[in-house]
């Protein structure tokens, strides 16, 4: 079975040249949207992908560049298609996503909870979740903002897709050397210290065999200035289709 990835956007939270770092993960029989930021609906429109072609959404954490498009997505599914989108999300994020993010815009007499607008499927950290016959996802909590849970994804026991995260070299080495990881999609902050993100220099400090499997995403507008500074690591391009 073949996995394919098409990033709706590859930009950091405040990028203007690139859309929010959200991606479409395609299996033979299932399409998963990983994160749905502010710009996701516009990027889907530009790609000509209808909301109804997406079988489920999975949220890694609650920052607007990862959840800011959910209100539009859910309202359009409700009022245009009469359906609730399937939402995969860590059980720890269900309450804050509704109470702190969506309730303000979405609540009304007939909508009083997340479950009124999404078919919520809670994911447990560290478990293998069978999302579709050919897609298994393990949620791995990774460090980002203290007190604000963020979950990276381990796909089919071979591909790591980072949420927003600070540098965690031991995790990456464990995945590659002990858990058969063969490809890594990793966020990168190209400018400034890695207080809540991972810097290019930090990733360059990894062993070459790990660097060689890294594709960089969630990057700054000046990415083109760093293409020759990333060594063996490659930059994902938004809207391009990648076979994993
Ligand atoms: N403690 C924090 C919190 C947030 N931020 C910035 O806000 C952005 C929110 O989306 P992000 O993609 O996680 O990137 C965060 C930082 O740019 C930051 O720099 N430091
Ligand atoms: Zn982000
Ligand atoms: Zn974030």
Image (tube, rainbow, N blue to C red):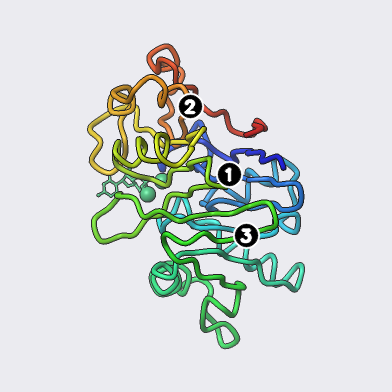
Q: Position of residue 92 (x, y in %)?
A: 39, 69
Regarding mark 3 in the picture, which secondary structure is present there?
strand
Furthest toward the top, the residue is: 228
Regarding mark 1 in the picture, which secondary structure is present there?
strand
Separation of disc 1 and disc 3 at Cα?
A: 16 Å
Q: Looking at the image, is mark 2 or mark 1 nearer the viewer?
A: 2
Q: Quick check: 120 left or right of 210?
A: right
Q: Residue at x 41, y 26 (%)?
A: 210
Regarding mark 2 in the picture, which secondary structure is present there?
loop
Q: Is residue 176 above or below residue 36?
A: above
The residue that label 1 is drawn on is 23
Q: Residue at x 41, y 74 (%)?
A: 95
Give whichever of 61, 63 is nearer the camera.
61
The residue that label 2 is drawn on is 213
Q: Quadrant of the C terminus?
A: top right
User: In which image quadrant can residue 227 be found?
Assistant: top left
The tag earlier along the polypeptide, 2 or 1, is 1
Q: Is residue 171 above or below residue 94?
A: above
Q: Position of residue 80 (x, y in %)?
A: 75, 67
The tag earlier along the polypeptide, 3 or 2, is 3
Q: Quick check: 139 left or right of 192?
A: right
Separation of disc 3 and disc 2 at Cα?
A: 24 Å
Separation of disc 2 and disc 1 at Cα?
A: 18 Å
The residue that label 3 is drawn on is 131
């Amino acid at each position: 079975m073949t996995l394919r990835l098409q990033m709706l956007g590859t930009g950091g939270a405040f990028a203007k040249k690139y859309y929010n770092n959200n991606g479409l993960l395609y299996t033979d029989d299932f399409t998963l949207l990983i994160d749905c930021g502010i710009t996701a609906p516009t990027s889907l429109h530009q790609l000509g992908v209808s909301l109804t072609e997406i079988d489920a959404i999975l949220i890694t954490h609650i920052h607007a560049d990862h959840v800011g498009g959910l209100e539009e997505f859910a309202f359009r599914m409700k009022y245009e298609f009469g359906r609730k989108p399937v939402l995969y999300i860590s059980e720890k994020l269900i309450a804050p996503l509704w109470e702190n993010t969506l309730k303000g815009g979405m609540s009304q007499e007939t909508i009083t909870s997340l479950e009124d607008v999404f078919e919520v499927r809670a994911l447990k950290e560290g478990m293998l979740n069978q999302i579709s016959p050919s897609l298994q996802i393990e949620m791995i909590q990774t460090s980002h903002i203290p007190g604000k849970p963020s979950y990276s994804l381990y796909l089919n026991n071979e591909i790591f897709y980072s949420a927003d995260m600070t540098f965690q070299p031991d995790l990456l080495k464990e995945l590659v050397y002990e858990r058969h990881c063969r490809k890594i999609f990793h966020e990168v902050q190209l400018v400034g210290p890695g207080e809540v993100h991972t810097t290019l220099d930090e990733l360059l400090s990894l062993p070459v065999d790990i660097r060689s499997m890294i594709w960089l995403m969630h990057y700054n507008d000046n990415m083109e200035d760093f293409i020759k500074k990333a060594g063996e690591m490659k930059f994902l391009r938004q809207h391009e289709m990648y076979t994993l």
